[in-house]
Image (cartoon, rainbow, N blue to C red):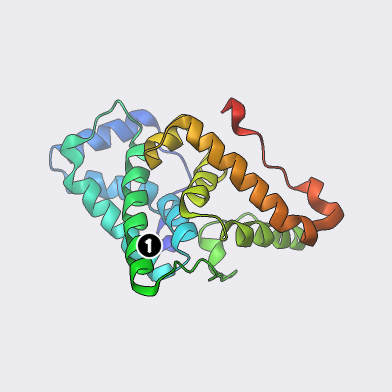
């Protein structure tokens, strides 16, 4: 799966249409599940790529997540948002991959950064200064722990609530807020020296009310 294959994935699918596709996919209609994949693959890839920082690994994780989702469709409950359920699966697959890599290498390498690949996950670039600031922010995000990084991505990139993030990561909402607070402090510390007087242009909103 290549991110460019989902050029229209940013458009949110109406919940009624999504529910109909899920119901059809649960009845064994593969074309319905393919439509769900098309609707979510770019967002999921962007989230996973930010975690693993490797194009091929991100594609493998997304592929595995979609396969697991397809195989588990019978257990999906409309009580939860489909995106929450899907991101939970992808997060667990990515985390397992990172743990395996850590076991093999002794560490997880979050230093890989290719600004060119960033377009697959974030296409908003109004000015050269905006691109520079965004690169500084996401480079700093790379130094966060996996759970802090996931929390930041889901909160700021996916606009998920702390409650929903907790469901995805398998932790209480209050712990999510704690991770957001610690992550913001780390990011401020990492960016302060580089941004100097320009710090006020970047804001990490307080998650206390999320």
Question: Would you say residue 89 is visible in this rendering?
Answer: yes
In the image, residue 141 above or below residue 35:
below
- Vertical placement of 114 versus 204: above or below? below
**Which residue occupies 72% across, 43% down?**
203
Residue closest to the far right: 197
Comparing 194 with 17, the one in front is 194
The picture quadrant where one finds residue 23 is: top left
- Quarter occupied by residue 83: top left
Count up the numbered dots.
1
Q: Residues within 10 Å of mark 1 (few under 14, many from 20)?
A: some
Q: Secondary structure at mark 1?
A: helix
Q: Residue at x 38, y 35 (%)?
A: 167
Q: Which residue is located at x 19 percent, y 40 percent? A: 73
**Is 137 on the left-hand or right-hand side of 210?**
right
Q: Compare residues 198 and 158 and report the one nearer the observer.
A: 198
Name the residue beneath numbered marker 1: 98
Estimate the x, y position of residue 84 in percent, counting from the top left.
37, 38
Query: Quadrant of the image for the N terminus?
Result: bottom left
């Amino acid at each position: 799966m290549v991110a460019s294959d989902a050029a229209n994935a940013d458009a949110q699918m109406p919940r009624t249409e999504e529910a109909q596709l899920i119901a059809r996919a649960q009845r064994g209609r593969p074309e319905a599940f393919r439509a769900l994949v098309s609707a979510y693959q770019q967002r999921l890839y962007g989230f996973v790529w930010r975690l693993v920082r490797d194009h091929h690994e991100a594609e493998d994780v997304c592929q595995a997540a979609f396969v697991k989702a397809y195989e588990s469709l019978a257990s999906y409950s409309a009580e939860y948002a489909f995106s929450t359920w899907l991101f939970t699966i992808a997060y667990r697959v990515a985390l397992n991959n990172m743990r395996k890599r850590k076991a093999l290498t002794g560490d997880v390498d979050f230093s890989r950064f290719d600004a060119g690949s960033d377009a697959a996950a974030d296409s908003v670039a109004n000015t050269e200064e905006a691109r520079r600031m965004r690169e500084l922010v996401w480079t700093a995000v790379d130094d966060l722990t996996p759970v802090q990084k996931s929390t930041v991505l889901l909160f700021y990139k996916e606009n998920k609530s702390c409650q929903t993030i907790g469901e995805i990561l398998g932790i209480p909402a209050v712990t999510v807020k704690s991770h957001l607070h610690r992550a913001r402090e780390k990011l401020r510390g990492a960016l302060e020296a580089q941004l100097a007087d320009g710090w006020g242009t970047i804001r990490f909103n307080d998650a206390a009310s999320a």
